[in-house]
Amino acid sequence: MSAPRLLKWQDDELNAQYQNTLSLSDGFSASDERYILFHLLNQFGFHPFSREQAMELTEELLAESWRDEESNP
């Protein structure tokens, strides 16, 4: 099993945004939330190519445990 890719604070931010994205039905607001999710993933060094890939990647990352600041990636 590979080492966790996110730090605790990144995991917290991504989880909060993922919950916001899931809580909306498809529509204009949902699109805004997906753009924010894309932005966070990009900031953390991940580059999904579609909404579906962004959601799948987020689910995969959140299923992993997070790592401490002192840990090596």
Image: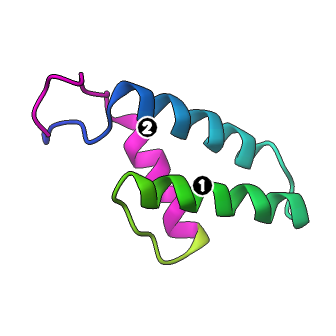
The vertical placement of 45 against 11, above or below, is: below
The residue indicated by pointer 1 is 37
Badge 1 marks a residue whose secondary structure is helix
Image check: 53 left or right of 35?
left
At which x and y percent is residue 68?
24, 22
Q: Residue drawn at (89%, 66%), measured in percent from left and top?
A: 28
Residue that badge 2 annotates: 62
Task: For label 2, count other residues whose C-alpha is less than 10 Å away and answer few (under 14), some (14-19) or many (20+).
Answer: some
Q: Disc number at residue 27? A: none
Bounds of the magenta span? Answer: 52-73
* Residue type, numbered disc 2: Leu
Quadrant hosting residue 17: top right
Label 1 to label 2: alpha-carbon separation? 13 Å
Q: Is residue 43 left or right of residue 3?
A: right
Does the segment drawn in magenta span residue 32? no
Expressed as whole percent of the image width and height from the top left, the position of residue 47 reads 40, 68
Coordinates of residue 36 in the picture (x, y in percent): 65, 56
